[in-house]
Image (tube, grey):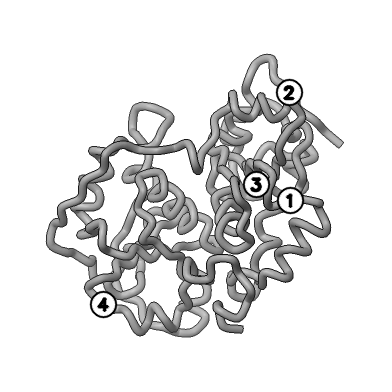
Amino acid sequence: MKIEDRGYKHPDVLVSTAWVAEHLNDPKIRLVESNEDTLLYASGHVPGAVHVDWTKDLNDQIRRDYITAQDFEQLMSRIGVTPDTTAVFYGDRNNWWACYAFWVFQLFGHTRARVMDGGRLKWEKESRPLTRDVSNYPAATYKVSARNDAPHRVFRDDVRKFVEGGRGQLVDVRSPEEYRGERLHMPEYPNEGALRGGHIPGAKSVPWARAVNPEDGTFKTAEELRKIYLDDQGLKPDVDTIAYCRIGERSSHTWFALKFLLGFQNVRNYDGSWTEWGNLVGVPIQKP
């Protein structure tokens, strides 16, 4: 089904692999690959795509925070992106990291941004071309006044207010085993430092992968998404919503689905997520 026929609130935020194939040489478009495996780009990528390393390019190397406005300007200059360039993100793992990079770009106000539906998974399943040639573009001029976290990001004190005040909606997008406290990490992943298992009190368990079609990683239709989040879980688009996971990568995928595909009015990502909450002294956790 075509993206525009799926009933999304903002269908223009998604582009198909076919659309990307048609725009490989469009100077107004910059393809951005961002993966969990930072070595994957070198093994082959969509022709013309630049690599944004989530560990080095988006995260500050000293503080547990994202890069500064100045660092973002330097990144955009390096990959040849101006304020008028449309950045199209894709990545591995059904586009967690594409949505994560997209989300970070929103912190700096770069709203000319799209996500390639299905990411590398769909591109490769369709036998579309990959190259090992590193993409280089002329340096661009980019100016940012300041990073603005408030519309998109929450911190632990905001989450505490949700819990203590009993207001808003919390969505835990991790696996059911993590939610129940049976695991401190995803299967096949090492423990990233959380000391306790469980979930934030009151959080609904809606694993991120429920939003996508497993065969190609594309997003399900708006009707299917409404059943998952609204009908089955009772979430309301007009109520303040916080999504979280372990470090904010899976929850950025759910944030994207709720905000842009279903039109939730105020949904934010808690990137501290369980790695932070599971280690905090004096905060409650919940287990079934």
Q: Residues within 10 Å of mark 2 (few under 14, many from 20)?
A: few
The quarter of the picture where residue 132 lies is bottom left
Position of 95 compared to 231: left or right? left
List the residue tagged with mark 1: 236
The image position of residue 201, as x and y in percent, is 77, 31
Going from N to C along the chain, the mark reached first, 2 or 4, is: 4
Q: What is the three-letter code of the residue carrying label 1?
A: Lys
For marks 4 and 1, give the one nearer the viewer.
1
Callout 2 secondary element: helix
Answer with mark 3 or mark 1, whichever residue precedes in sequence. Answer: 3
- 123 relative to 105, above or below: below
Please identify, in this view, whether the residue under mark 3 or under mark 1 is nearer the observer: 1
- The earlier-in-sequence mark between 1 and 2 is 2
Q: Which mark is residue 164?
A: 2
Front disc: 2 or 4: 2
- Asked whether residue 120 appears in the rendered view, the answer is no
User: Rounded to the nearest whole Å, what is the CA distance between mark 1 and mark 2?
Assistant: 20 Å
Q: CA distance from mark 3 to mark 4?
A: 38 Å
Which of discs 2 and 3 lies nearer the camera? The answer is 2
At label 4, the amino acid type is Asp
Left or right: where 191 falls relative to 88: right
Question: Which of the image's four quarters has the N terminus?
Answer: bottom right
Residue tagged by mark 3?
186
Kind of residue sitting beneath label 3 = Met
Q: Nearer the viewer, residue 265 or 268?
A: 265
Location of residue 139 (image quadrant): bottom left
Q: Which residue is mark 4?
A: 26
Task: Name the secondary structure under disc 3.
Answer: loop
Q: Residues within 10 Å of mark 3 (few under 14, many from 20)?
A: some
